[in-house]
Image (cartoon, grey):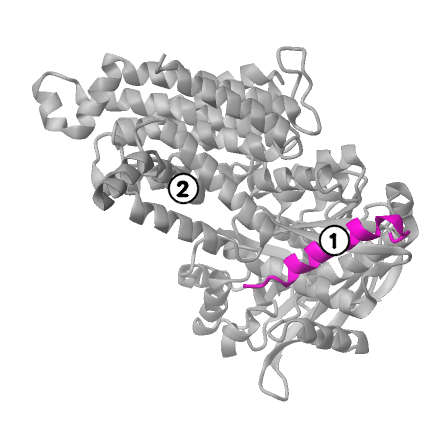
């Protein structure tokens, strides 16, 4: 069992009690995420990234001591997320909130943070509308349309004229389908067929046959990482789709770094678009991964960890400039730009969502034989396209 | 007197909790709501003996009904509660018509299936339900036109506790009635009850509908206090956890449902706040220990302790 976090909190509480006479003020940040259950991966990625950031920058932001309090919402569970957030606000009196893996959880706390005026940095939840629900929301992850539309542009530029879309039949999948289709058709492409696949499907043979019969230049897919993504990629290879001249295009959700190795040879040559690849070639990214490995030797950098890392940067900027004043804090971060492990990013002052480069990547083996998402093209400074409807 | 004393204790505990934990009202409200849900499950499973792992079907339907009612029709909380109860009862009636023909494992599987089907329906009609994003934008009016739902959650807590009392009293009355006795008889031996002329299928359906209404009330309260309904209201996990809480406290006795829920959720909350990363171990150990040492559930603890002492003496 890990008691380090607990000891840290206890120690900080003790210090705060002892040193309350001294000037060192503590600014508290509540982190609500999934640390248990099937989505515990997200919580772990968040915590590792926060720990790495704190290891690099220290526990002080400006003149303020920063203290993180972690709470487990156990998955897409808005009741729990809201109750925990309420507790953080009224009992622990946190000045900032962060985390939130799932859209319903983030939406459930919107009225709270609005009323309490607490700046909240969303590390993951990827539906466009969230940031419109409160002026105190900032998001450092990405939205599905932000990733899908640039891929459509790139496909057109590659001479791809027809596609079949096949997405998982739930909110994010449908967002991806809409985002891709709108852009692709606007640029003169043609969608021959739009397939929505049930969430639990792992047998994609019939869908592949249907796609093959339609004979498009490419297929576009959105599938969340996990067993279905693995089965889909394998099915694409087994059915000889590449040989039939049908290219594989998808959002990077399906081959994020934590699951990439399990996809195996079947994944070689598929194209995905995403804001972050662990193979992004920059000194900062290399340092980020080295520091991650220091706090947790088994850590793998992926979109969730970089979302949390940049989110922590946003928190530190806000705390340094605003302390416990929410409006000063928001002002400090809106419009701010900095270099992130994923590349240059800006917090859009209007949408409060991150404007960033979207990369088209191809799956390859690197020199050591590991699968990597190699960035082959950069679409610079893409804003959240989901709201600009 | 014996009937009233436990209620007095419950009232005292509820009031004491309000003053001792003024900063944990959101959590206490969740416990109270869960108690109502587990109580309704106790009627179905503990009293009538209907094995179910899909009680979330009624909870979820009540939640969506109350949420949609608040958004599109009227934001009055009590009206929403009634709508949730009716919705839960209706879905229990419709599904009960074919569920009550099955027994044992088949019944268990079918109850799971009903909840899963409803979840998929809610996912498909995302224009109405919000799908995976959840049904947001629920605004609650003042309770009885007087009390506003406040930030700290005082109104919400008092409201939920009052509803819990109402449900508890109603269930006590139901269980003590000839109808309740018939249900117990059915649990012991369906064949014998049929032989003495009890319409078994109809009694079971009636209990399922009543339990459904209770589940719907729980869901409606959850929708009103969270002001958002997600697909999770239909989740298997919710059904399963409710069964665990019931077994933990002891089935068929109503008070066991309350104790089991309180213990399970408190241990969960405390363990998860002490160590948000490994708390599941604690919950697992607790359930194992209780099921192993006190098969009757925590309600059976006094009798079990007496037995141990007797053995020592």
Of helix, strand and loop, which mostly describes the magenta segment? Answer: helix
Image mark 2: chain: B
Q: Which residue is mark 2?
A: B116
Name the quarter where the C terminus of chain A is drawn: top right
**In the rendered view, would you say B216 is above or below A159?**
above
Residue B18 vs A80, above or below: the answer is above
Side (left or right) of B220 relative to A26: left
* Residue drawn 63% across the image and 56% down it: A190
Determine which of the numbered discs, if any, sits on residue B255 in the image: none
Q: Which residue is mark 1?
A: A14
The residue stretch that appears in magenta: A1-24
Residue at point 45%, 30% (across, down): B35
| Residue A6 in magenta stretch | yes
Question: Dot 1: few (<14), some (14–19), or many (≥20) neighbours within 10 Å?
Answer: few
Q: Is residue B58 visible?
A: no
Per the image, label 2 sits on a secondary structure element best described as helix
Report the number of numbered marks.
Answer: 2
Q: Is residue B27 magenta?
A: no
Q: Helix or strand or loop: what does disc 1 sit on?
A: helix
Q: Chain of mark 1?
A: A
State the image quarter where residue A369 is shown: bottom right
> In the rendering, at what x and y percent does residue A17 appear?
78, 49
| Residue B232 picture location, percent across and down | 51, 41
Q: Nearer the viewer, residue A135 or B211?
A: B211
Residue positioned 40% across, 60% down in the render: A206
How much space separates mark 2 and mark 1, taking CA atoms? 48 Å
Res. A20 visible in picture = yes
């Amino acid at each position: 069992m890990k008691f380090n976090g607990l000891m840290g909190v206890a120690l900080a509480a003790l210090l705060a009690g002892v040193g309350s006479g001294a000037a060192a003020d503590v600014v508290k940040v509540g982190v609500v995420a999934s640390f248990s259950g099937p989505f515990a991966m997200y919580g772990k990625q968040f915590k590792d990234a926060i720990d790495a950031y704190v290891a690099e920058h220290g526990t002080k932001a400006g003149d303020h001591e920063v203290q993180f309090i972690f709470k487990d919402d156990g998955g897409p569970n808005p009741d729990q997320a809201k109750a925990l957030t309420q507790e953080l606000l009224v009992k622990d009196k946190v000045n900032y909130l962060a985390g939130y893996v799932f859209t319903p959880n983030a939406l459930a706390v919107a009225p709270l943070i609005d009323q309490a005026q607490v700046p909240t940095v969303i590390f993951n939840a990827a539906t466009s509308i969230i940031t419109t629900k409160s002026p105190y929301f900032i998001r450092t992850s990405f939205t599905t349309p932000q990733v899908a539309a640039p891929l459509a542009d790139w496909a057109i530029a590659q001479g791809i004229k027809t596609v079949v879309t096949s997405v998982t039949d739930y909110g994010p999948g449908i967002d991806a389908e809409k985002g891709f289709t709108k852009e692709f058709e606007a640029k003169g492409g043609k969608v021959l067929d739009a397939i929505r696949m049930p969430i639990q499907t792992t047998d994609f043979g019939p869908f592949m046959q249907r796609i093959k019969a339609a004979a498009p230049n490419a297929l576009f897919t959105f599938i969340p990482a996990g067993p279905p993504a693995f089965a889909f990629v394998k099915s694409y290879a087994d059915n000889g789709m590449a040989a039939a001249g049908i290219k594989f295009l998808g959002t990077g959700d399906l081959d994020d770094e934590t699951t990439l190795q399990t996809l195996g040879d079947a994944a070689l040559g598929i194209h995905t678009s995403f804001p972050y690849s662990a193979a992004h070639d920059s000194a900062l990214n290399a340092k980020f991964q080295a520091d991650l490995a220091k706090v947790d030797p088994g850590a793998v950098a992926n979109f969730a960890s970089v979302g949390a890392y940049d989110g922590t940067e946003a928190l530190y900027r806000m705390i340094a400039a605003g302390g416990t004043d929410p409006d000063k804090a928001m002002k400090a971060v809106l419009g701010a730009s900095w270099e992130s492990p994923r590349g240059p990013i800006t917090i859009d002052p209007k949408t409060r969502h991150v404007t960033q480069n979207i990369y088209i990547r191809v799956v390859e083996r690197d020199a050591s034989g590991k699968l990597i998402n190699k960035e082959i093209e950069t679409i610079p400074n893409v804003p959240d396209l989901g709201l600009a409807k | 007197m014996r009937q009233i004393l436990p209620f007095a204790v419950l009232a005292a505990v509820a009031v004491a909790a309000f003053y001792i934990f003024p900063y944990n009202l959101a959590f206490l409200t969740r416990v109270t709501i869960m108690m109502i849900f587990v109580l309704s499950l106790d009627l179905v499973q503990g009293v009538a003996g209907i094995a179910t792992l899909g009680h979330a079907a009624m909870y979820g339907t009540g939640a969506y009904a109350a949420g949609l009612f608040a958004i599109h029709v009227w934001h009055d909380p009590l009206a929403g509660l009634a709508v949730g109860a009716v919705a839960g009862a209706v879905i229990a009636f419709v599904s009960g018509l074919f569920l009550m023909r099955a027994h044992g494992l088949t019944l268990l599987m079918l109850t799971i299936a009903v909840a899963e089907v409803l979840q998929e329906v809610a996912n498909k009609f995302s224009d109405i339900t919000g799908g995976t994003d959840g049904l947001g934008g629920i605004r609650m009016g003042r309770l009885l036109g007087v009390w506003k739902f406040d930030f700290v959650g005082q109104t919400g807590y008092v409201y939920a506790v009052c509803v819990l009392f109402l449900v508890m009293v109603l269930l006590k009355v139901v269980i003590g009635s000839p109808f309740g006795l018939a249900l117990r008889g059915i649990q012991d031996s369906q064949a014998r009850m049929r032989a003495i002329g009890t319409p078994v299928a109809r009694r079971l359906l009636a209990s399922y509908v009543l339990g459904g209404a209770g589940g719907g009330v729980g869901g409606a309260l959850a929708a009103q206090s969270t002001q958002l309904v997600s697909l999770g209201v239909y989740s298997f996990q919710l059904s399963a956890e409710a069964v665990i809480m019931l077994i933990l406290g002891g089935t068929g006795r109503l008070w066991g449902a309350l104790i089991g829920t309180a213990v399970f959720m408190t241990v969960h909350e405390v363990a998860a706040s002490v160590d948000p990363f490994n708390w599941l171990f604690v919950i697992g150990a607790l359930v194992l220990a209780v099921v192993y040492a006190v098969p009757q559930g925590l309600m059976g603890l006094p009798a079990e302790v007496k037995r141990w002492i007797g053995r020592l003496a």
